Amino acid sequence: MSQRGRFISLEGGEGVGKSTQVKALADALRQRGLDVLVTREPGGSEGAEKIRELLLTGSDDRWSPESEALLFAAARADHVAKTIRPALEAGRWVLSDRFVDSSLAYQGGAGDLGIEAVRAINAVGIGEDFPDRTLVLSLDEGAERARARDADGSDRIGGRPDDYHRKVTAAFHIIAAAEPERVKLVDASGAPEQVTKRLLEALQDFLP
Ligand code: TYD
């Protein structure tokens, strides 16, 4: 039987260059001979992509904070069961553009439900399949918001006020401090190639 693959998630607030880095990191891992499945949240499976639409479109008050967190957790449960778990069991690496730490930071930290409450409602759907490593792209606050404002196509959550996004960033720092072995903050400033290099360094202990 093949050895279980590694599960890596990439996180960060809005406008930290995450999409570019997901692609670059996947390429770099493949160059090292790894079989990498790239996926994203909310989404990553047929059912979860349907729930994504419910979450990201419509008015800000379309869902209560509780129902929003539960919808993210429901999408995640389907994503884990249909996409992530089978890939890991087949020995593939999984690189997910966002995972549970986005819920902890957005719905838990910024949305006031609290990080621990959101962790609890996600536990059933995730089971043992927690990420082996979570890389949080971080910029200093001013730079992060400036880049976010430049990013087009703000959705239901991306379009929330600056204060909400400041709390998201703060929550990512709290999570990283609480779980230093799993969650690493990675400086997202500078040239994209430099950032990719830093991401790889933060995975050094897993690389063949
Ligand atoms: P997306 O278009 O994927 O944007 P990004 O490039 O920022 O990843 O939008 C996802 C939005 O949903 C983003 O604003 C973060 C938010 N989100 C949560 O609030 N909770 C979650 O659990 C996840 C996965 C995403």
Image (tube, rainbow, N blue to C red):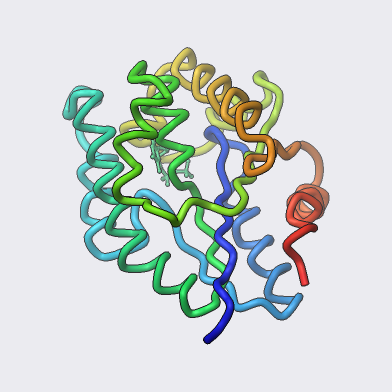
Q: Residue at x 55, y 83 (%)?
A: 2
Instruction: Indicate left or right for 100 with 4 as reference.
Output: left
Q: Residue furthest bottom?
A: 1
Indicate the position of residue 101 as horizontal and vertical percent values: 48, 38
Instruction: Indicate left or right for 149 with 133 as reference.
Output: left
Q: Residue at x 73, y 62 (%)?
A: 206
Q: Of 158 and 137, which appears nearest the observer?
A: 137
Instruction: Indicate left or right for 110 with 16 as reference.
Output: left
Q: Name the image quarter holding residue 32.
A: bottom right
Q: Residue at x 41, y 67 (%)?
A: 85
Indicate the position of residue 77 as horizontal and vertical percent values: 29, 53
Indicate the position of residue 98 as horizontal and vertical percent values: 48, 47
Indicate the position of residue 140 as horizontal and vertical percent values: 71, 23
* In the depicted structure, whether residue 55 falls above or below residue 23: above
Q: Quadrant of ligand 1?
A: top left
Q: Residue at x 53, y 23 (%)?
A: 171
Q: Of 18 and 201, which appears nearest the observer?
A: 201
Q: Name the image quarter holding residue 116.
A: top left
